[in-house]
Amino acid sequence: MPIIKSSIKRVKISEKQRIRNSAYKSKVKTLLKKFENSLSTDNNDVIQQNFCQCVSALDKAAQKGILAKNTVARKKSLLAKKLKLQTLNAKEKTAPDVKQS
C-alpha cells in the first residue's frame, strides 16, 4: 500500500475504474451471447433488436475506452456477417421453390 496521499487516491480511483470496466465488459459479453442465442430462432425482429443492442454497447465501450476501437470494429463486423447470413437463410426458406425444366 502506498504511503503518499496522491498515490493512495490513485489506487482508490483505479480500483473503481477496474470494477466499472469489468461490469461493462460483462454486460457486453452477455449481450453478445444473447445475440448468438437469438440466431437460432426464426424471429428476425428479435435478432435485429439484439444486434442493435450489441452494436450500441460495443460503441459505448469504445467511446469510454473500455475496449479498443479496432476490437470493437472487428466484433461489429463479425456480428454483421452473422446477421446477414441469418437473413439470407431466412429468405431462402421462405422463397418458393421454382423448378426449371
Image (spheres, rainbow, N blue to C red):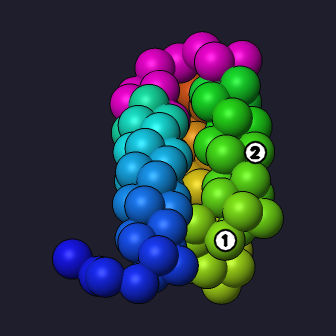
The answer to whether 14 is drawn above or below residue 99 in the figure is below
Which residues fall within the magenta stretch?
35-46
Magenta span contains residue 40: yes
Question: At 78% from the left edge and 65% from the top edge, which residue is drawn?
Answer: 63
Magenta span contains residue 49: no
Question: What quarter of the picture does the C terminus occupy?
Answer: top right
Residue 74 image offset from top left, x and y in percent: 60, 76
C-alpha span from label 2 to label 1: 14 Å
Query: In the rendered image, which residue does mark 1 sit on?
Result: 65
User: Which of the two residues, 42 or 12, is positioned nearer the viewer here?
Assistant: 12
| Mark 2 closeness class: few <14, some 14–19, many ≥20 residues within 10 Å | few
Residue 78 visible at all: no
Question: At 40% from the left edge and 51% from the top edge, which residue is drawn?
Answer: 19
| Residue type (three-letter) at the residue carrying disc 2 | Ser
Question: What quarter of the picture does the N terminus occupy?
Answer: bottom left
Classify residue 79 by image quadrant: bottom right
**Can you tell which mark lies on residue 95?**
none
Question: At 75% from the left edge and 37% from the top edge, which residue is drawn?
Answer: 52
Residue 97 image offset from top left, x and y in percent: 64, 29
Classify residue 67 by image quadrant: bottom right
User: Which of the two residues, 24 or 2, is positioned nearer the viewer here?
Assistant: 2
The answer to whether 77 is drawn above or below residue 44 in the figure is below
Query: In the rendered image, which residue does mark 2 sit on?
Result: 56
Return the disc, 2 or 1, that comes first in the chain's sequence.
2
**What secondary structure is found at the residue carrying circle 1?**
loop
Residue 68 visible at all: yes
| Residue type (three-letter) at the residue carrying disc 1 | Gly
Furthest-left residue in this view:
1
* Foreground disc of the pair 2, 1: 1
Question: At 47% from the left edge and 39% from the top edge, which residue is drawn?
Answer: 27
User: Which of the two residues, 1 or 74, is positioned nearer the viewer here?
Assistant: 1
Q: Is residue 95 left or right of residue 40?
A: right
